[in-house]
Image: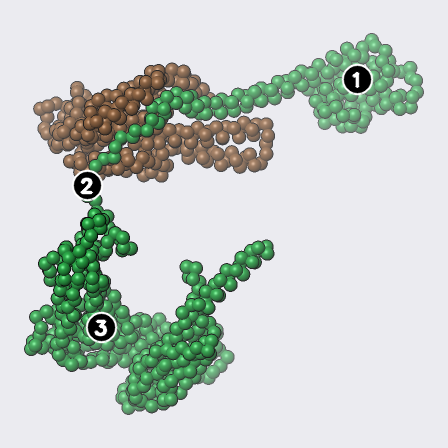
Amino acid sequence: MKFGIMVSLLFLLSVNTVCARDGDVDGGSENIFFKANQFYFNGEFEKAVQLYESILKSHQFHFFPANLIFKSESRGELFYNIGNCYFRLGQKGNALLNYERAMHLIPRDADLKYNMEYVHDLTEDNLPQPENIISEIFGVNFFSQTELATVFCLVNLMLFLFLTIRIFFRAEWIFYVIIIFSICWILSGISFSIMLKQTIFDDRVVILAKEVGVLAGPDKKDTLLFKIHEGTLAYQERNESGFSLIRLPDSKRGWLVSSAIEAVVP
Amino acid sequence: MSLKKIFYIFCIFFLAFSANASADISIGLTLDRSSVVSTDTIVMKVTVTGKRKSSFPEIEGLSSFNVVKGGTASRLEFVNGSMSSEVEYIFYLTPLKPGRFVVGPAQVRIKNKVYSSNRVKLTVSKARNNQAGNESLPLFLEAGISKNNLYLNQNALYTLKLFMSEQVSDISLEMPEVQGLVFESLAEPKKYSTIINAKRYEVVELKYILIPKKLGEYSIPAAGMRMTVYKRNRRGSFFEDPFFNIRSGKPVYLSSNEIQLDVKNLPKQNRPDNFSGLIGRFDLRARLDPVEVKANESATLTISVQGRGNVRQIPYLKLADIKGLKIYQDKPLLNINKGESAISGEKIMKWAIVPEKSGEYIIPSMALAFFDPEKGLYRELKTKSFSLKSNPVADAESSELISISGDNHTGQKAKNNNKQEITRIGKDIFPVHTSVDPVKGLIQQEFFNQIFILLLLAPPFIFLALLAGRTLFKNNHKNRLNIRSRNAGKNFLKKVRGQDLSPEEIHAAVLNYLNTRFLLKGGLLTPNEVYTLLINRGASLETASMLKNSIAQIESVIFTGEKSNSLTQIQDELTGILKSVDQEVK
């Protein structure tokens, strides 16, 4: 049974490699990138955003898990640049949304951290930042998605290499090497799994509207519970007739119009 | 240990000792108490630092004491890579008469150079022979105060002495609690011995500073001490040895004497306006450094107040605003030292003074008022007024000037070593990343994806494939052997039936049958081994012994070289026997 599931999963993954990429890479991307940078420095931030986003769109992956895991750090840089453009355009919500997206890919980037903190300081709602101790322990917030995937793949390679060697050559030292790699495989596998879980089930949304009323139900006539402002990070629970049920880090819940928010992982 | 390591260790020690040779040498003299009674024993220590060897110290002022040498202790320390050495000479002094004495200086000679120590004052009062009450007891507690008439907030020394002529342990102290009086522990308890009425006592002395916070007449209640007392065995038996001493102690509670105290208010007459409640004896020092600066450079005014008394109430002096000068106050520093009989301390206040323009500025004097309880008078100390000269700045230099932060300011220019806190002036986001890597990275993304997938999937696939292959191969090999084993009898018959074979060929065919039939590794079996093998594999005794005999017969023909006509008969017999073997052994 297990063997069957494994083979099916591996088959699915291998299929993805064949049809992973949606757009073709062309040499024009570099020019577009340079142009976008020029627009940014000339103060034409809207044009810069369009160009940066066009590069991202031309290199999208639609199939699991390539669309979730194997995003290169370059995408993080592009999200960072888009975030900067939105900040210059006065859209703190969009800026934070793109910084959050970049955070998955370049979590140790000092510029990104600084800008994010700065924009957070400018937001109006004072809410506690959610903390995940397990993610901290397993380094999920410190390493990028690609790094975690790479480490797991390398450990996976080494473990199975030595397991394969042990089929033919039963030396004692190979046994101990396999034990060490097994431990590493478990640890990196946990980190990888947490990262996958966080990415697949990331229900975070950022408020894009300047101010939005949070209601007791998915109807404009429902009682207004509280108001939240642009740039606030919330968790989306479900959607219903153009309204989304959100939960704030301080556990306040309510409904707001879906157009006022955007998911960190689209 | 290699020679190289020994050489390095030698070098380290050589450098350390050569460093020691150049270290500063100093000598100090200390007494364990500054006032004693004539029957007390005082511990005197002469400490020579910077050298582990010196001439024996010669000490002045010991003519009124009986001196007993207590030994020498030397110490060598390596701390943070630097070495320090010290030698300590210990002496026990017993006063010969009461009086006030000056002990010291102690002098030592190191490399033909004489080093002298400090002097120490010692007051020796008369012995307690005339005191009444406790002196005949083996244990008693005595409380004392340095003054019975105090001013409000004036410090006094409260002393508790436990006299013991018997062995005690588990001592716990209960200090008196009086509303309006504060006790502050001074130092670690001291232990020494004394003689009262020709009886030797061990004394534990505790010192406290008493601070009256309210006016009035006080009766300080007795302090208490709980302890366990062990009585000495006067017979001096073998079991007096502490090793065998398993007697249980007796709990004892001791109370001290009560003390009367009168606290009165400070006199209102001649009280200065700037008096802040400071009582004791204090000294005031002031310094301006430098006295001449360029415009926009800073000078530092330092004022220190030091003395004995309620040092925590030393006020923060205020420097008045002076036109043309920017003044930045630094956080004052208060150092408190708990001495043997009083609390002393020093408060250091600093101001950074920056002249805005060139010219001469006068910094006015500042005053400190305190009450001297010894003389019963208010006193006022004043700093001298300083003149700060500010020179004009050349144009080229003026561009180097920096602004100075107000927080924790040290008042120095950037080129000086004194550091200052950096204050944030503006805030903005960092710009976009313009490196071309983002795009290149995207182009390489597909390749990396395939590598990731390959690394993730290929190893388990290869491992599983190899594992499965090996398992299949093993199974196939085993099956093949089993088939061959089952066909061994048929093959033998094919080979033997109707053939005119030599004895060697018949022998080889039989052994081949046995090896194949029983999956043996092809060894040469003796008739007895064949017998044992068949029995072990489940053949009957008859069949086993028949085969054994047949093989023995063939071997006999082979090894003796006899020509036998019965070979055909043996061949037929063997055919029958091996059929039986096939039937009997599954």
Residue at the spot 36% in from the left edge and 36% down from the top edge: A139
Q: CA distance from mark 2 to mark 1?
A: 103 Å
Q: CA distance from mark 3 to mark 2?
A: 47 Å
Q: Is residue B218 visible?
A: no
Name the residue type under label 2.
Answer: Gly
Query: Furthest residue to the right?
Result: B562
Which residue matches tag 3?
B307
Quarter of the rendering occupied by the N terminus of chain B: bottom right
- In the displayed structure, would residue A130 be above or below residue B403? above
Taking the image as shown, residue A107 lies to the left or right of residue A187, namely left
Name the N-terminal-most of marks 2 and 1. Answer: 2
Q: Which mark is residue A127?
A: none
* Residue B317, quarter of the rendered image: bottom left
For mark 2, give the secondary structure: loop
Q: Chain of mark 2?
A: B
Taking the image as shown, residue B448 lies to the left or right of residue A114, namely right
Q: Which of the two discs, 3 and 2, sits closer to the camera?
A: 2
2 and 1 marks in contact (CB < 8 Å): no
Front in this rendered view, residue B518 or B344: B344
Name the residue type under label 1.
Answer: Ala
Name the residue type under label 3.
Answer: Gly
Q: Which of the two discs, 1 and 3, sits closer to the camera?
A: 3
Front in this rendered view, residue B295 or A136: B295
